[in-house]
Amino acid sequence: MLRRLCGLVGAVIVFSGLGGCTRNTPGAVTPGTSVYVARRIRTQDPARPVVEALAVRDGKVLATGTREEVLQSAGPGARVVDLGEATVVPGLTDAHGHLSGLGQWEAQVSLVGAASKEEALSRIASAPSTSYQGAWLIGQGWDQNDWPEKSFPTRQDLDALHPQVPVMLTRIDGHAAWVNSEALRRAGITRDTQDPTGGRILRDASGEATGILLDNAMGLTFSVVPPLTEAERATHLSAALAWAARVGLTGVHDAGMDLHTFRLLQKWDKEGKLPLRVYAMADGSSPERDTFLREGIYQGDRLTLRAVKLVLDGALGSRGAALHQDYTDEHGHRGLLMMPPDEYERRVTAFMAAGFQVCTHAIGDRANTLVLDTLLRAAQATGSKDGRHRVEHAQVMRLEDIDRLGKSGFVASVQPMHATSDMPWAETRVGPDRIRGAYAWQRLKSSGAVLALGSDFPVERPDVLAGLYAARTRQDAQGNPANGWYADQRLSGAEALEGFTVGAAYASFAEARRGRLQPGMDADFVALSVDPVDGPASELPGAQVRLTVVGGDEVYRAEEK
């Protein structure tokens, strides 16, 4: 379990595990006052945007300025940490991720990046033992859009490998599952099974299930998979937190947290063992929502729960995103709403009335229109006009709805890497007109919307440097297309950094404490080998996170090379 520094082996930080040192342990590596010196420290403070040193005391920023100014403020005996040529930035927050999913992603067979169905099947055939959840083989990350045939796989592909073991493999976006015949049998899915509301069982010409389940239809198999043990949950969550710190994250907005995960993080937070700041959105799509609603908002030390996550439609890649008009590449199909509009409005109103921020997954333009209409009515009914309610993804929108989002004071929680992952096929799905309102970050900013940037890990890699690169370039890792995909929607280096710092803080009601490095604010910061604002964007994907600090605690330090 990643937490407070307990010792050093060379330059590699050693962490104590769940039973080891906690905050304020005698002998820990950050007692008293520490002064950090670097080539450049970007504070996001308009009064002193770039300085060369900052002092930290009791988990807060004590002073910023020149080395001499800060050393004088720190007083005698301060520990000085020289970060050399590094650029220090305020703590980076992923405004939309899934910690439990990331932990499971590490344990399960990964199909991410498989360039063909055959490669995916080869990985499945050699799946590690940790991929099994009870008797079920579980994996994730396939994307048929990356395969030559561009078509969905089938249950027969899996049956050839595992005729008796149930197999369930979720798509890269988490909105489709590829299952074998044994999984269908255990879930009771036959040719007579009706599509659930907000879900779709793909069928062949004879009416038999092909083995692809979209959106709510996935629940038919999820419901019969054995649950994780408590030990597995703890192991997965610990691994996810360690990964987040390693890639330079000081905070995560967890988009749809289940009750088990919340209870575990709550326990660790009370014990001083939570390494990062976690802003939790309660899972509003499960029966556990009633417990979250009844217990209300929670504010701990590094764990906050004051939001709810609702899912209104599916994903564009699996054609589950709800559109006003037909998919350009599938006539007669307009996607799926995951719940009826009246039920969505009931949940929104109930959580708003209880003081929760409402965060809604909306990818298609129909879903985004419905979210805005509903939020405006519910805010009026509950008096929650300043609730900073969020549209998660805001991916394909009508231009008039982009304008409404900003003027209504809502937050656009967007993920730059989604654009660079989807750009090879997104326009095929929605056509040349609707694409103008898709992944439209500059149009959202012009509307007045605050952008909070994230990755949606494990859908995308939990790599904030890759997110900064995608935001600045709208290119893949090889620099394609040459000028960026719809380059007019790119963010500048300053705008991209703002989205992962100030924007994320605002979206979690924390702008008075985080997002900037100013005296009195939380000492959350990251040291990078590349300046994310003025440095070459092409260097970001290969850059190094050298140090991650949360509340004055050095939770990750890279090994010296």
Image: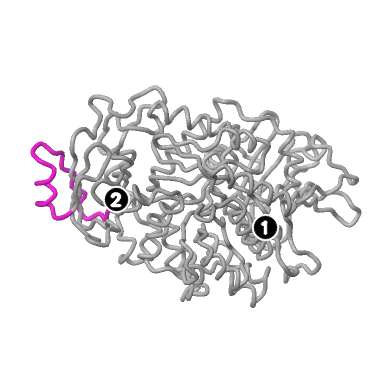
Residue 532 location in percent, x, y? 34, 61
Where residue 330 appears, as percent x and y from the top left, is 77, 67
- Label 1 sits on residue: 144
- Where does the magenta region start and end? 65-88
Q: Quadrant of residue 40?
A: bottom left
Local packing at callout 1 (Cα closer than 10 Å; few below 14, some 14-19, many 20+) is many
In terms of secondary structure, where does tag 2 sit? strand
Disc 2 to disc 1, C-alpha distance: 37 Å
Residue 527 is tagged as: 2
Identify the residue shown where x is 57% and y is 58%: 393
Look at the numbered discs 2 and 1 and tell me whether their residues touch, using CB distance below 8 Å: no
Disc 1, SS:
helix
Query: Residue visible at 43% across and 68% down?
Result: 491
Would you place residue 163 above or below residue 84 in this image? above
Question: Which amino acid does the dot numbered 1 rest on?
Answer: Gln
Residue furthest top in the image: 19
Give residue 548's quadrant in the image: top left
Q: Indicate the colouring scheme.
A: one colour
Query: Local crowd at mark 2 within 10 Å, few (<14), some, or many (≥20)?
Result: many
Q: Is residue 176 left or right of residue 404?
A: right
Q: Which of 453/27 is in front? A: 453
- Please report the residue visible at 62 percent of the width from the left and 33 percent of the height from the top: 291
